Amino acid sequence: MKQSSSVGVVTPQRARFEAPLELRSGGVLPGFELVYETYGTLNAARSNAVLVCHALSGSHHVAGVYADQPGNIGWWDNLIGPGRPLDTDKFFVIGVNNLGGCYGSTGPASINAATGKPWGADFPFVTVEDWVDTQALLADMLGIERFAAVVGGSLGGMQALSWALQYPDRIGHALVIASAPKLTAQNIAFNEVARQAILKDPEFHGGNYYEHGVVPTRGLALARMVGHITYLSDDAMAEKFGRQLRHGKPVYSYDVEFEIESYLRYQGDKFAGFFDANTYLLTTKTLDYFDPAFAHGGDLTRALSAATAEFLVVSFTTDWRFSPQRSKEIVNALLHSDKRVSYAEIDSVAGHDAFLLDEPLYHGVLSAYLANIRV
Amino acid sequence: MSYQRYDYEVIASWIQPGERVLDLGCGDGGLLKYLQDVRQVRGYGVEKETEKVMAAIGNGINVLQLDLEQGLAGIEDDSFDHVIMSLSLQAMHNTQRILAEMLRVGHEAVVSFPNFGYWRHRQSILNGRMPVSESLPHQWFNTPNVRFFTIADFEALCEQEGIVIHEQLALDDGKVILEEPNFMASMAAYRLGRG
């Protein structure tokens, strides 16, 4: 077996689209930019391209490192590279920062040419379908008529699913991991708590905090803390933190005592230090709105009948944010509309976060599936 | 030819070209691959263990990782022409429910199983030892089998559950056994329908 390795040093690129973009929310962007990275080489037939879609807080930096930031490793680096499941000796892999993002693609912090100020609260709502449309425009620009596969976890999986419905002729395989055909009320509820934390931060200023020179970091940190709770399983949290006390005994204070408090505060503050609050708000709404069956009277089987891609659906046993049951809804709908689909339910204690880990059986399933894709 | 291969051939003889089939306990997808080759079926396998799911995916088979003991909830009635269970029924706890589920989601079911009433097995028991043979390859302490039944037992269960036996084939070493199958056959296959 060949040795697997990272793709090494990578460089982000930028694509500019001049034509106005009409969004499903009714909003219009007078042109936009997407930042992206690529790994591997596009073959002569242009048939080996794989799009990797990111989730709530992800970016175009999917794999590798930057020359000037050797510690800045791509968020799905363990998946991508020579000899890895998404083998860059075979595939040409693309990561894109989605529209509305805060890693360089046009988003709420970008300057609105009409006002000369950041878009802020005026940035239009974007849907998963809008994202897929803009990814398709990028594919056009790169000369990619058809993706061998579109891969994503969580919200990224929704994009992979949507690709199969919106552009059935332009996708060979959809890998939908730790995802769902739509959010449940419970899931929307978590998102709403996160949004309220940001919206109620006095430094939010109705979304136009940029011009006040402040950032609603307290709200954003709280939002991220809520998120982190839902990404871990009860068991994983118990195993990692248990009831460990920083001082070895109760000191009766509201400062950090339990290690889980320390972890959540650290994660929240770290996130609030670099992520844009408007992007977080926007993206949670993107998640909430996704529901391809809605236009078909709630009939997911009918909604998925447009797809011609083959599917791999993967879930994780302890993921309660995007539970196996939600993945099975996708699988059953595909089964009933006579699509080619395989489904793996991976035993893991890691909860939703498991999709980012390289547990051998999980990566084994992905490798087996991806190895069979002909390019 | 292997024991399993005879089973494959019997099952294939009951499947029409182009059918939609579900293979419960599909392992690495060998039977589905065979049925795709000889009957051009559109098939899905169901398998519980991730290692086998991985192997089936590697073989290019559609495979769904589900625990059959939980039934086939979420799969609609009459979704398949045939639901197949090859040499696995004896390893399932929830026999009646699984048979009912097979005939719910499938128009018909095909079931094959090792016959515990086979004469060599009886001889083994008479000699005081649990049978170990080509069709029952495990020792009593490591067998995955949890239900020990004969051809006669199975037919009695079908009668009790109102399951119609459309066709039956009993085999020993690849030869069709017509007389005294409960004594002479090491395995049996059934094509079943709803009452």
Image: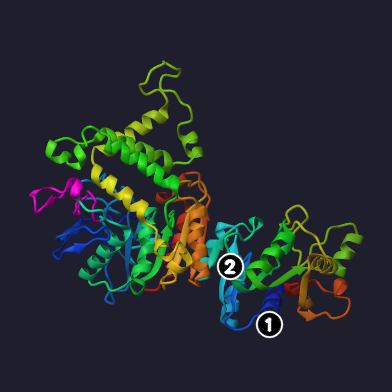
For label 1, the residue is B13
Q: Position of residue A79 (x, y in %)?
A: 37, 56
Whether labels 1 and 2 share one chain: yes
Residue displayed at 43% across by 58% down: A181
The amino acid on which the numbered mark 1 sits, given as a three-letter code, is: Ser
Q: Which one is nearer the viewer's eye here, A291 or B11?
A: A291
Question: Is A117 inside the magenta-drawn segment?
Answer: yes
Q: Which one is nearer the viewer's eye here, A124 or B164?
A: A124
Q: Which one is nearer the viewer's eye here, A3 or A264?
A: A264
The chain letter for the residue carrying disc 1 is B
> Quarter holding the N terminus of chain B?
bottom right
When asked about the image quadrant of residue A133, the answer is bottom left
Q: Position of residue A293 (x, y in %)?
A: 42, 62
For label 2, the residue is B45
Assign a secondary structure to mark 2: strand
Specify start and end residues of the magenta stretch as a single range.
Answer: A99-122
Q: Are marks 1 and 2 in contact (CB under 8 Å)?
A: no
The amino acid on which the numbered mark 2 sits, given as a three-letter code, is: Gly
When asked about the image quadrant of residue A160, the answer is bottom left
Q: First in sequence: mark 1 or mark 2?
A: 1
